Amino acid sequence: MYFMSWRLSRLLAKAATLLTVIFFAAGASSQPMGAGAMRSGSHPKVESVLTELQHQQDKGIAFGQGFSQQRGIQVIDNYITVFFELGQGRTVKDLDADTLKSLGVRIIKTSGNMIKADVPVSMIIPTADSLPAIQFIRLPDRPHPEGYVSEGVGLSKATKYHAIGYDGSGVKVAVIDATFGNLDAVIYSGNLPAGAVKVDCTGAGCTEVLSFPSSESAHGTAVAEIIHDMAPGAQLYLIKVADSLDVVDATNYCKSNGIRIINMSLGFYNQNFYDGTCYNANVVCSVQDAAANGILWVKSAGNSAKEHYEAVFKGASDDAFTVHNTPILFYASKVGEGIHLYLTWNAWPTTDQDYDIALFFYNDLLSDPRNARPVDYSANIQENSSLPPTEAIHYTADRSGTYVVYIYRASATQDHQLELYASQSLYPKVSKSSLSCPADAAEALAVGAINAAQWSTGPQEKFSSKGPNNANPPINKPEITAPDRVSTYAYDTYYGFPRSFAGTSAAAPHVAGAAALILQANPAYTRSDLWNALISSAKDMGPAGPDNAYGYGRLKMPKVFAVDLLNPAGGETITSGGAYTVAWKAAPTVTKFKLKYSLNNGRTWKVMHQDPYVAGTDYSWAVSVPREKKNCLVKIIGYDDLMVKRGKDKSAPFVITLP
């Protein structure tokens, strides 16, 4: 205690001498179910899904919850909102009030013979039986939103994949996030599938759950929406975490469940020196573990370009860290605003080099500089010990206005580079190397942000974190950029205006969804193949080649073909009189094919099969020519089930020789 008081007194003394401040305001049955089985237990006045919901609820609350969640039916405190259809000419006055009360029915609104009401799940059938005026009880009409598909789907050209049937089907994608608020409402709206798997890893392990608290932030829900917009057929796993050890469990869950793509739109700080190094089961360790197991980890680059400062501390022991005699400033706009400061220096993983950090309210320093006390400080005792080189402050603003950050050399014997991150914009700031962790990992595909409204021209969002990381040698980051300020049901309905989802959190899931489409189209692709497909097709922006703002450029889907001829590719020598396997791959919508060959470099063509069309992905061609041919070609034409031509492909020249 004496030591800490003595150290604090040193901080106060130094702060009093530094007052030149620049203000900153900155599983299914094998047989189909018969009609009798489907109607078993049904009620003539109740929609069947509601009848089954009550039957499941009668078995136990867990059964009812599982049933309702799987179908996107919102049940709150055992109540469900339904419509009563009354006979023509009847109104709510024809319903006995005492009976309604005894059943626990709560009328919400009426219009003519239609009534919207909340009914206990256990009272759905009794309500139908007890009120003769009711002709039918059903779920309310479900609108299908038309304005909540992310603008990034069209900007990235994902629509070209959708048009020929690629939707991410067969690909498992995980969203690792801290909150999934408003999830049930978004599923009910149709903007997320009811079959999304919900996993809570914040306990002793990972447990599949029915839902998450609706009151928490909708961040992860909005992220998942964008992936679903990009790859509507992908199987989503929504995995909740609260710290880096939860991320370890989440990664293990992904490995065990065949998940190929992870999106993480979360940032961690003080995990390392932002150099992509794995220490103490930090999130970089999880990224590296996932990569070693063939999982592509897509990570938001961070929103810290204006909330980051770095410099080498130079000065005598106990000096305060300033810039041109000006402390580091930021502005808190309201009382109750969270203030988070993270400091680290290049002495990892443990050190006896000691720095401290203190937070002052500017007006306190201005009015009484010698007696002003910090509103909070962090003074871990690294000297004479082996602690990580980190300090952090988490403070709730009790006053709005300008705050001052001082960093002090407590007992460091060397000059160290300091990295400071804040939850508010800093003055001065350094946007270079402002990545959040684990975007600094070489194995993480880091994604920057471009405003969707400025997609073709840029610039990168001012807050979008820039590279490189602090490795030796440094690695260019981010790898790619994607759109933000896009539409999601989760955010737009909450904030009340369109395109409300901004930040690299919104950019990253566009890339994760794009990866799912590419993987469906190329199921043999490895993690490296996916990575290379994304960066090689990106549209270069900024300086030529990869840079530390746009990476390899803005997201652009690789070219996709309805039909892709694999064999022959060209250059082969095929022997006449034998059989040659012509092979191809095709988009899901392409189901019938016509194969042709030319012996004169495409001047004339012949069909190689007797049936009008062939199916599958290969055909055994009986090759026969009277003499050697050097400029032979094969062509394939693909059609959908309606016999609409969807695409074609042709080989390069090859040779057919005699035996």
Image: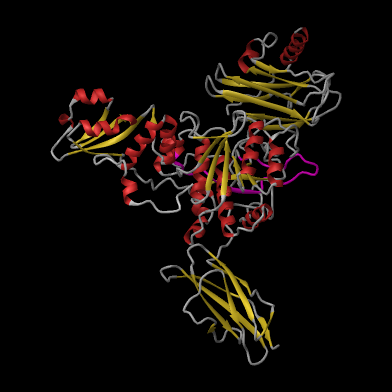
User: 341 above or below 274?
Assistant: above
Q: Position of residue 405 (x, y in %)?
A: 68, 22
Residue 12 visible to the viewer: yes
532 lies left or right of 222:
right
User: 42 above or below 26?
Assistant: below
Q: Which quadrant of the view contains residue 205?
A: top right
> Quarter holding the C terminus?
bottom right
Q: Which quadrant of the view contains residue 125?
A: top left
Q: Is residue 650 magenta?
A: no
Q: Which residues are magenta?
A: 464-489
Principal secondary structure, stretch drawn in magenta = loop
Q: Position of residue 327 (x, y in %)?
A: 70, 23
User: 655 above or below 496?
Assistant: below
Q: Is residue 481 magenta?
A: yes
User: 510 above or below 69?
Assistant: below
Nearest to the observer: residue 489 or residue 452 = 489
Nearest to the observer: residue 168 or residue 53 = 53
Residue 467 visible to the viewer: no
Given the current orientation, which residue lies at the most extreme right position?
Answer: 413
Q: Position of residue 35 (x, y in %)?
A: 32, 51
